[in-house]
Amino acid sequence: MERLRESDKMNGSVLDDNVKDKEPLASVLLLVYRNFDGIWGSLDSVFSQTYGNIELIISDDGSPEYHEYEADVKAYIEKRKRENITSVIFNHLENNVGTTKNCNIAIKIANGKYIKMLSPYDSLHDGEMIKKCVEYCEETGAEIVVGQTFVKRREIYGDVEDSIKNTPLYRFRARNGRKCILTPTTVDIKKLRKMKQSECLRLLSTWPIISTPSVFYKKDLFDRTGGYLDLSRLIEDMPYWPKLAREGVPFHFVDIIMVDYSLNGMSNGGGHSQEFKQDYARIMKNIYIKNEYRGGIFNGWLKSVRTRNVRLTNGENVCGFSRFMLFDVYVYRLYLNIKYLVFGTRI
């Protein structure tokens, strides 16, 4: 890891001490790898925040072109940042270590009481997002808050933001990125908030319902639990939520839209690497599907269906008797899709 030079710490205008005392520091971690073209809108969304005490950390995971963009990014930040950005830290890793390690390194660098992660091409939903989350955490003592992600339509369908409707027809028209959606859905959030703590934690151990861009948390939580698990280079979050659930950490679900999420970025534009697909399949099989408890006497069959579903989704060859029996995968998919289209939830 390259040492943080003094020139890499760009101190913002000093706010009134009374304001700082009232508002705990919130760190926004912008994690970059070879996607600098999408960084400008992400930065603008941070600068537009009304919250008065924000630390911005840009952590680059060994991008070969980093030094070509470094000066431009610094100049852009210096020109546009407001006085609420009380410090800016650049962290560049000389070698690519993967998403998980980059996240953990950035978290260790962070000085904030609260952490919000962000990726290029994505942006904080509105200027009140950080303020709303900090106020909620301060009032309730929540360590981890899960809101909603505004998933933008794919560029090929036009760059128009839909007024999202909670209707079966809208959800049908929105499939495959044709229109914008919210995830978790509004129905999901309502269901999760009504669940008993034990039921909610059990669900989080068996189904990846959390949309990671919509998570806001205390840094102390990561320090106490050891940060993201080093089980995958490219997927940092999926193994971590079940770990927290098993340890009994309360998840707070709120109706705050946190991030506008782009389907045109490095990790979601439809071109996942084989390494990413293999990591995803392994995490699903060894954590989420392994913990499956629903179905009673059909539990084994349900696990088998979900395993084959993951293998099929990630392009793994399915042969022999399993290939002949793939109809159960399609039936299960159909059931989940109908449930989502009609009721707006897969829970």
Image (cartoon, helix red, strand yellow):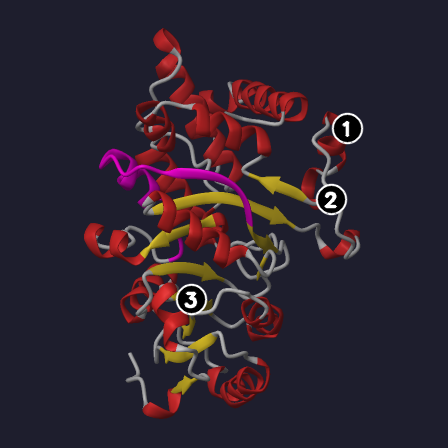
Q: Are marks 2 and 3 in contact (CB under 8 Å)?
A: no
Q: Which residue occupies the foreground of this view, 182 or 120? A: 182
The residue tagged 2 is 179
The amino acid pointed to by label 2 is: Lys
**Residue farthest to the top, as pictured:** 297
Total marks in image: 3
Q: Give the Cα separation between the discs numbered 1 and 2.
A: 12 Å
User: Which quadrant, please, contains the N terminus?
Assistant: bottom left
Highlighted magenta segment, given as a residue range: 234-257
The tag earlier along the polypeptide, 3 or 1, is 3
Whether residue 239 appears in magenta in the rendering, the answer is: yes
Amino acid marked by disc 3:
Leu
Question: Mark 3 sits on what residue?
Answer: 29
User: Residue type at mark 1?
Assistant: Leu
Q: Above or below — where is 37 with respect to 313?
A: below
Q: Is 286 displayed left or right of 158 in the figure? A: left
- Element marked by disc 2: loop
Say if mark 3 contacts mark 1, CB within 8 Å: no
Q: Quadrant of residue 37?
A: bottom right
Q: Residue at x 57, y 67 (%)?
A: 42
State the residue position of label 1.
Answer: 169
Q: Is residue 319 visible?
A: no
What element does badge 3 sit on? Answer: strand
Please report whichever mark, 2 or 3, sits nearer to the chain's N-terminal start. 3
The answer to whether residue 304 is left or right of residue 187 is left
5 is higher (above) or lower (below) than 176? below
State the separation of the CA atoms marked 3 and 1: 37 Å
